[in-house]
Structures are given as C-alpha cells and as structure tokens.
Amino acid sequence: MIGVTRSALRPLGALAAAADEIAKSNLECAIPESRRTDEVGRLAGAFRAMRDALKKQHLERRWAAQALEHQLKYKQLVIDSVEELVFVLTKSLSITRINPAVTRLAGHDEDAVIRTPLTRLLSLVREPAEAGGQARDDAAVIGEVLKAGRSLSGAPARLKTADGRVIGVRLNLVPLLDQNRVVGAVATLRADEADLPRDGRV
Amino acid sequence: MSQKHILMVDDEDAVRSLLGEVLDGAGYRVTGVPSVALALEAVRVGRPDLIITDLQLDEADGFELIDAMQERAPGVPVILLTGVLFDHAVIARIGEGKIAAYLEKTSSLDRILDEVARQLAKTAGK
C-alpha cells in the first residue's frame, strides 16, 4: 500500500523540482513525460505548457531589448555624426543633451553645460533697434518662438566657447512636439565665419 | 517532411544567436553567418529554402547580397530585416521584385515566425 502510494506520488516530486527550477529562471528544465491521463498527467502537461509559454515570453523580451538597443545605438550614432553643434533643450531652454561636435568645436563638456540655459552660452545678433528698443532678452525672444510652436532658421548668433572665445554661428531652433504640445526644442548651430565678431569676447 | 533550411545573414552576434535559437526551436535548420562572403559560401555548399538578411552588413549592404543571391540561388525567397537607418517606403520601392518581404527589426518574434512560415509555404506550393 505504502509502495503504491510512493510510486503514485513520485511524479509530483519531479514536478515540484521542475517548479523550483522554473522559479530560479531555469526555463530549460526537464519536465517528466507522463502517459498518465489522470490529474497528475494533466498537471505535467500544464507545467510543460507554462514553461514553454514563459520561454517564449523570455525570448520575446530578449528580442525586444536587443531591437531597442540597436535602435538607440543607431539613433545616437546619427546625432553624434552631425557636424553641426546640437543642443537638446527643455521648454525653458535648459540644455539636456549635446552632441560631440559641441565639445569638439566649442570645448564645452557635457557635464559642464547640462542644465545650463542655452542663452548663457549663446546670444542672438539682433538689429540695434530691435535689441535696444524692445529691451527683451534672448530667452524671452526664443521662448516666444517656441511657445508658438514656430522655428528659427539661420538666425545669426554668437556662441561663447569654453575658453572664452566667441564664434559667429547660425542658429536653427526647432520645437520638439509631442502630440502637438511643445515639450522642448533642438537647437543646431553652424559656425559662420562671416559672422565672427572682430572684437573678440562677449 | 524534410527540415527547411534557413540562411540568416546578420553582422550582429546577438541577432544571429537569438533569432537562430528561435528558428531552431521552431523546427528549422538554421545557418547563421555574419557577412556576404560567408553567405555566398553557404549557398555554394547548399541551397537554402529561405534567406533572412539584415540590410546593414559589414562589407556590403543587403541589396548587394540579394543581387548576388538572385544569380546563385534564384527563386529562394528573401526576407529583409531592417534597422533604423532606412526609410521603409524607399526599401519597398528598391526591393520590389527582389525581396519576398521586409520586416523591421522591432517586429515581434511571433511576427517574424509567421512571415517565415508564410514564405516557406509559398515556395512549397511551387
């Protein structure tokens, strides 16, 4: 009687061991085959189906993760390869990201400029009447453009480099729109030799 | 029924390894190679039933591989797996008549397996 009971329960022990392996993320664990058609046999079948479903989910997750990594890597590569200086900005014009050209051409390290307002590094070149008459600072001018969801294209500006020099640049500023809401902006600067000021420093 | 042979060309180890595991698990025989040269060598050794290739390969792009395959293994369907550097509308235009299907690399494995099965079923009927 005891021998029969032990023999009947042996598959349950094997299933419990398999469940322990699955709990340890071992999805290659063997689940005993059973020809039994009773509850124990059905339980083994259900375990196998559960392990296979988990395996499939696990593979899908790994695939999605590598696809995401691939996408991010190439999108980053595209930004990093842009010759223009690229600044990603918040709505209030704080710098959140730069591309390597900013460091290469203007000497600004990422750590030093992240969270800095762009207008601390960059000033617009405006007509004297406009600059003086309206007495609005650059942040207000650019802020208004952004708030309206508009862009600036080729606006003359001066960029202060990390060592205090000034470079004449052309500024393109494009709002980042998420479902028609302005969530930030991308500023790209192209060095413009013709606009380099003669007197040097800002 | 004999096991279908899939030639997979991708220069990323992670993609070859993972997709290979999945296709193998689905019952296909898979040859994974990282380059056009090795793909051509694999076709010389044995004609595959299906080719899955990336578009960005180390020494040549996937279109060059497809052109070469059309000469060396005509009639073998090619599924193009594309990454982020290509415009899909452009790929569809350029690949017309040359590729059986193209999928983004962000497609789910289920979607890829469905497309593989669909293409193999089409060739089985020929």
Image (cartoon, rainbow, N blue to C red):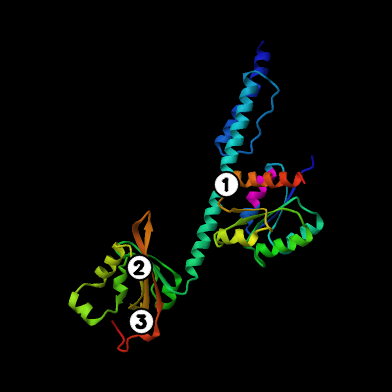
Tell if the residue under mark 2 belongs to the same chain as the one under mark 1: no
Q: Quadrant of residue A53?
A: top right
Q: Nearer the viewer, residue A15 or A76?
A: A76
Left or right for A91, reference A33: left
Point out the image quarter for the N terminus of chain B: top right
Q: Residue at x 57, y 46 (%)?
A: B108
Using the rendered image of the protein, determine whether residue A26 is visible from the camera's viewpoint. Answer: no
Name the residue type under label 2. Answer: Ser
Verify CB contact (< 8 Å) between mark 2 and mark 3. Answer: no
Verify CB contact (< 8 Å) between mark 3 and mark 1. Answer: no
Left or right for A140, reference B41: left
Residue B11's disc is: none
Residue A168's disc is: 3
Q: Position of residue B32 (x, y in %)?
A: 70, 54
Tell me where the magenta segment starts and ends, as one range.
B17-24
Name the residue type under label 1. Answer: Ser
Q: Which residue is mark 1?
A: B108
CA distance for labels 2 and 3? 20 Å
Q: Position of residue A120 (x, y in %)?
A: 29, 72
Residue farthest toward the bottom in the current orientation of the protein: A198
Q: Which residue is mark 2?
A: A151
Q: Residues within 10 Å of mark 2 (few under 14, many from 20)?
A: some
